[in-house]
Amino acid sequence: DDYNVFSVDWKDGASNVFYAPSAANTDTVGAEIYLFLQFLNSQVGHSPNNIHLIGYSLGAQCAGAAGKRNPAIARITGLDPASPSFESKGNNDKLDASDAQFVDVIHTDGDTFTGAGGYGCWAPNGHVDFYPNGGQDQPGCINVNTAGEQKGNLSIRKEMDASGNAGMGCDHGRAPDYWVESIGTACKFNSCPCTLGDVCTCSSGYNRMGFHASKSPSGIFYLVTSNTSPYCL
């Protein structure tokens, strides 16, 4: 379709040796995004009703910080929103459903963050929350270092994908992979209404995970993916 796409580069604020300053900087980035959207509106008449913010991990929290300043934004998509420094906070300090007219979230690494736990939020954040494969462990991702390593004040878990490539967060990184695949694929990522932590099947009541998600039906949704790309079954 016909879109204007803007990419936000905040590497100078996100690359701290310690995690906490990077997490704190998400509010500053959100304020800058808000000002930019105000500029678009005042200079070229681009309405918040035509704005869709998409953020991964800490970027999802940046999008939420922008939305809190202008919840008239049409849509925010959170791709496995960062959990450390945010999961235990109230909705005023993290991405939640009040930050835009429609907030959809994909949860892929929602393990409890203790020791070598998950990087993504486990609790539902949006109008629609998708939990592919249960939202904690993704097929094809293998934990190769359960003890983790330390970087600043954050425990880093090493994982390996199905191709044998080791990385910091295979489960966490699947959220943007699923999102990208959902845009143009013929497979619809149909997801079933479910309760948090359960495995569900259905014959109706679907919502589509990813680009084509809709605000209705709302709630928590479950689906199964394959362990390698293409992920949609």
Image (cartoon, rainbow, N blue to C red):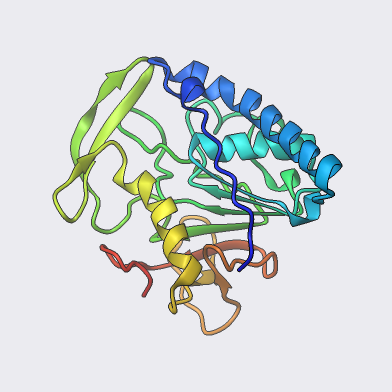
| Relative side of 20 to 115, left or right | right
**Percent coordinates x, y for residue 146 in the rendering:** 21, 34
**Residue 97 position (above or below residue 85):** below
Which residue is painted at 47% across and 51% down in the image? Answer: 107
Q: Which quadrant of the view contains residue 15?
A: top left
Residue 132 vs 83, above or below: the answer is below
Residue 81 in picture, x, y percent from top left: 52, 41
Q: Is residue 81 left or right of residue 114?
A: right
Q: Is residue 91 visible?
A: no
Side of 113 where 191 appears, left or right? right
Residue at the (70%, 28%) spot, across then down: 31
The quadrant of the picture occupied by the C terminus is bottom left
Q: Residue furthest front?
A: 43
Looking at the image, the residue that sits furthest to the left is 164
Q: Where is residue 53? Give x, y as percent.
A: 63, 47
Residue closest to the eye, 226 or 197 = 226
* Quadrant the N terminus occupies: bottom right
Residue pictured at 30% horizontal, 46% vertical? 170
How many numbered badges does the structure rendering display?
A: 0
Q: Is residue 225 above or below residue 91?
A: below
Could you tell me if residue 151 is visible in this image? Answer: yes
Nearer to the camera, 156 or 46: 46
Q: Is residue 123 above or below residue 184?
A: above
The image shows residue 225 at horizontal and vertical percentages of 35, 67
